Amino acid sequence: MGSDERHRDQAASVRSGGATMRAALDRGVSEARLGFFGRAYLWAVFLVLYAPIAYLILFSFNEGGTMHRFTGFTLEWYREVANDTRLIVIVLYTVLIALLASAAATAVGTLGAIGMYELRRRYREALLTLNNVLIVSSDVVIGASFLILFTVVGLKLGFVSVLLSHIAFSVPIVVLMVLPKLYEMPPTLIDAARDLGAGPLDVLRRVILPYITPGVLAGFFMALTYSLDDFAVTFFVTGSGFSTLSVEIYSRARRGISLEINALSALLFLITVLLVLGYYVITRHGGKIRGVFVKR
Amino acid sequence: MSVRLRLLYMTPYLIWLALFVVLPIGLIAVTSLTDIHGRPTLDNFARFFTPTYLTMAATSVWYAFLITVCSLAIAYPAAYALTRTRHKAVWLLLIILPSWVNLLLKTYAFLGILALEGPLNAVLALLGAGPRPLLFTDFSFLLVSTYIFIPFMILPIFNALEDIPRGLIEAAEDLGATRLDVFRRVIWPLSLDGVKMGAQAVFIPALSLFMITRLIAGNRVITLGTAIEEHFLVTQDWGMGATIAVMLIVMMAATMALVGRRGLSAHGKR
């Protein structure tokens, strides 16, 4: 975000420097084209990044049952996915957990960010440091510490422990998505609302929330994908009876290759593409949050 | 905003901070100081500083370092090329998209790609170097991990390169700098923050990958993450697991201190 603003500052200062300079800059930017090697390299990286995914999806249609020799086309594995009630139940639970966790995390994180917004700088920085602990820590450490936590508290591992963990690691992401939006908001907006007699709840509901909605939605989406994709933390806190999709894929993959996983991955890839497009559309319309958070 | 109202807004958040950030850190620390029966002890740390665990930690750091260097070598030119494409947004989206695909599925794909009769071995055979077992080797661990982390590395570097004012590069060119000079003395120093952020985003998770080691590297590579998982979920020696976790946290903090605080704060601001 900061970079966009800086770009604009630069553009502004250049513009005030005179028309010739502006023309030069414009030319410079448009001349910044990629040579043949650059383009070839980018395509190569693109191919490398997509090859394994394409490979997975290709073999989901393999009649032969292995993942290294393609013998013929079949939809058998998709039928198997459709008939695998255990898998379907797990998918539904995974989606349910993701939706509940991101909704809860969005509520907690958004309110937290709004509270932090007017806090004195020193306190805010301290809170942000704590906030970022879960973002920079490794999944394994988070998972292990949550496992200890739930055991100490005496919570039975299962749906609830997974849900709580997912809420827990999603909250800081939401805060980081919402906070910049809050600072983008002109403070005079709130003052004006107050001067015009708005109560605190009106200010929240009719000024702040509408303004930061894109950030909130981006946070929700981010939390959703984090939750859907999480493996390591969930692996520690699922216990034996309950499973999410990632954990299930892991335990099946450990048993060896089953093209049912391939069929599932093809379906998931499709859903991911749709989700990413949704996220992309929201953030493009809403603000300048460049996809800074890569999925882990 | 009144103090009371602010407190009301923040209550759930503060509860979250206390329960899921502060308390777990404390619990990990306490657990690391207890033995398998829950009695206080320093044995776990003494055990950590024996050759077995130190070698494991050193190997883990070494692999994480290799993964970081490899992904940097691939990602930097890609990020550079990205800044010069005409359809930046589309390209960026295309490069990021694979990072949204479930990590386990990507890892699983390599079970087929690296198989003895798989495509990579077919290529090796054409070159006269195969087929040879690729799965369950340290090479496969390095390959798969690097593959997974490339997008994590590209993005921060891309952002840093995008921030370099075009005018600076032109000024250098006008003043007679060669293309190498421009890169070495303008572009590289100014993109260093992105490189640091990327290195941090790769190195830290790379220390604790355990699903990849389990699925792809067999037990050839044991990272700190693998050891923690093993102690917590297999041997049930939580004290030792927590000790390794504490050491991992210490190493991460050291990495971040080394790389500089900028990485973290930039993360927060963006």
Image (cartoon, coloured by chain):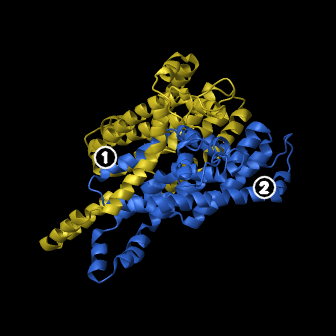
Chain colours: A yellow, B blue
Image side of residue B108 versus residue B29, left or right = left
Q: Please, which residue is most extreme toward the left here?
A: A19
Image side of residue A160 versus residue A176, left or right = right
Q: Amino acid at mark 1?
A: Gly
Q: Where is residue B191 shown, x and y percent of the image? A: 42, 67
Residue depicted at x 37% and y 55%: A42
Residues tagged 2 and 1 counted as in contact (Cβ below 8 A): no
Image side of residue A281 versus residue B214, left or right = left
Element under disc 1:
loop
Q: Is residue A263 above or below residue B158?
A: above
Pick the residue in front: A107 or B119.
B119
Question: Which callout, 2 or 1, points to the residue nearer the camera?
Answer: 2
- Chain letter of the residue beneath label 2 in the structure image: B
Residue A286 lies in quadrant:
top left
Pick the residue in front: A219 or A212.
A219
Quadrant for the C terminus of chain B in the image? bottom left
Q: Where is residue A121 shown, x and y percent of the image? A: 46, 57
Element under disc 2:
helix
Q: Is residue B126 above or below residue A271?
A: below
Write down the residue under mark 2.
B53
Write down the residue under mark 1.
A287
Q: Where is residue A46 shown, x and y percent of the image? A: 40, 50
Residue depicted at x 62% and y 53%: B139
- Chain letter of the residue beneath label 1 in the structure image: A
Q: Amino acid at mark 2?
A: Tyr
Do the dots labelled 2 and 1 sit on one chain? no
For label 1, count other residues whose C-alpha is less than 10 Å away and answer few (under 14), some (14-19) or many (20+). some
Q: Is residue B140 visible?
A: yes
For label 2, count other residues whose C-alpha is less than 10 Å away and answer few (under 14), some (14-19) or many (20+). some
